[in-house]
Image (spheres, rainbow, N blue to C red):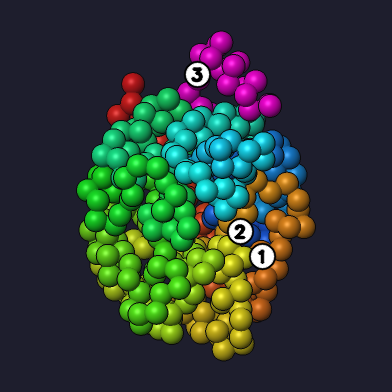
């Protein structure tokens, strides 16, 4: 693999300080900037970064760049000679795979500086239930200065995934998570969190994880946090008061550091399921245009048609937005948040790393 040859070369010659693109670099304007995209899958496979750039083409100006922090075990006793590449393809556990950050860093560093300007790499290879998670992030910044702009996507409560993870299960009240988010805020790293609003197939009216999540967000006012998928999942459906929940957070002055992404085709199906639901979502985005980002949540995608299919699912929503809100959702908020993250993280690295 090309990224592996790059690792061997880096080991041979020593790891240089990355030539990081400056905030304000001008990639293609495109249709959108992708705020949620996985270069690799649950067995750390994915397209070469140049192949992914070809998929992005001129339609996607910038994209986050991260893998998946969890590795699916290939347990021969469970699946025999079938090698599972997805967490639903095996009953064997998932485990945290820290080397994913090295894979992402070396893919990014293999590009010339002008192409690096189109990516914002994120650190994901930590266990959010481990008090050493923040130390892992610091070590990655130490090894790869000039590369990373954020942490995540990482998951706390995630349908069908959390129960498969080996070891202690992550929770919103774990001090390890607080320590991690405190450090992200100190450095200036954007934090992208997947946390379902509710448990799968829940029947209670009040989403079980809503209040603990709001408490977590309130505890970290100095950290820029993006709540992925509006808290929805494959089977975690929007509660009847989904719009009110979002507006309650967006209108709370204690939550001015909190953003939502509307990534993932499954979320698009919920938000676009009726004209009324699309109208409701558009109303909230038009009212709070600075607080939403668009992303595909595609995983190891090398097919351009499949990659852009998520964007096309949202066309009815985009048509309901004001021109200013549409631009901010698709590109402007990404540029603002990640340009600022680049600036802050580079300044922290300069002041704290030797």
Mark 2 or 1, nearer chain start: 2
Number of the label disc, if any, that sits on residue 311: 1
Q: Residue at x 56, y 10 (%)?
A: 12
Instruction: Name the residue at the top extreme.
Output: 12
Front-lying residue, 300 or 322: 300
Question: Is label 1 in a helix, a strand or a loop?
Answer: helix
Q: Residue 34: x and y, percent?
A: 59, 55
Mark 1 or 3, nearer chain start: 3
- Say whether residue 173 is visible: yes
Q: Are marks 2 and 1 in contact (CB under 8 Å)?
A: yes
User: In the visual, does 342 lie left or right of 33?
Assistant: left
Quadrant, the N terminus: top right
Q: Which residue is mark 3?
A: 15
Front-lying residue, 108 or 168: 168
Q: Is residue 17 magenta?
A: yes
Separation of residues labelled 2 and 1 (CA atoms): 7 Å
Separation of residues labelled 1 and 3 (CA atoms): 37 Å
Q: Residue 134: x and y, percent?
A: 31, 38
Instruction: Name the residue at the front extreme.
Output: 77
Q: Residues within 10 Å of mark 2 (few under 14, many from 20)?
A: many
Q: Quadrant of residue 288?
A: bottom left
Q: Residue at x 35, y 42 (%)?
A: 167
Instruction: Magenta stretch: give its range.
Output: 1-21
Question: Is label 2 in a helix, a strand or a loop?
Answer: loop
Number of the label disc, if any, that sits on residue 296: 2
């Amino acid at each position: 693999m090309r990224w592996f040859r790059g690792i061997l070369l880096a080991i041979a010659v020593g790891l240089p300080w990355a030539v990081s693109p400056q905030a304000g670099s001008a990639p293609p304007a495109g249709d959108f900037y992708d705020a949620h995209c996985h270069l690799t899958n649950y067995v750390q496979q994915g397209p070469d970064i140049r192949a992914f750039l070809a998929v992005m083409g001129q339609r996607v100006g910038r994209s986050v760049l991260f893998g998946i922090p969890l590795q699916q075990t290939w347990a021969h006793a469970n699946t025999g000679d079938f090698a599972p590449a997805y967490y639903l393809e095996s009953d064997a556990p998932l485990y945290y795979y820290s080397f994913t950050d090295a894979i992402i860093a070396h893919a990014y560093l293999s590009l010339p500086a002008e192409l690096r300007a189109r990516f914002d790499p994120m650190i994901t290879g930590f266990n959010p239930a481990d008090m050493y998670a923040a130390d892992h992030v610091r070590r990655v910044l130490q090894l790869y200065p000039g590369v990373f702009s954020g942490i995540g996507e990482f998951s706390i409560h995630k349908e069908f995934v959390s129960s498969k993870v080996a070891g202690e299960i992550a929770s919103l009240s774990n001090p390890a998570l607080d320590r991690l988010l405190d450090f992200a805020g100190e450095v200036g790293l954007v934090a992208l969190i997947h946390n379902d609003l509710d448990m799968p197939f829940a029947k209670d009216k009040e989403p079980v994880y809503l209040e603990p999540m709001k408490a977590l967000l309130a505890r970290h006012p100095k950290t820029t946090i993006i709540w992925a998928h509006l808290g929805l999942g494959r089977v975690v459906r929007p509660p009847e008061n989904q719009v009110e929940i979002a507006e309650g957070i967006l209108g709370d002055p204690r939550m001015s550091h909190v953003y939502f992404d509307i990534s993932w085709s499954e979320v698009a199906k919920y938000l676009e399921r009726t004209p009324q639901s699309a109208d409701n979502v558009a109303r909230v985005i038009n009212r709070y245009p600075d607080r939403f980002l668009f992303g595909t949540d595609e995983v190891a995608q090398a097919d351009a048609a499949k990659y852009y299919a998520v964007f096309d699912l949202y066309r009815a929503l985009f048509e309901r937005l004001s021109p200013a809100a549409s631009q901010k959702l698709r590109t402007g908020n990404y540029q603002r948040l990640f340009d600022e993250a680049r600036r802050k993280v580079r300044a922290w690295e300069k002041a704290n790393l030797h």
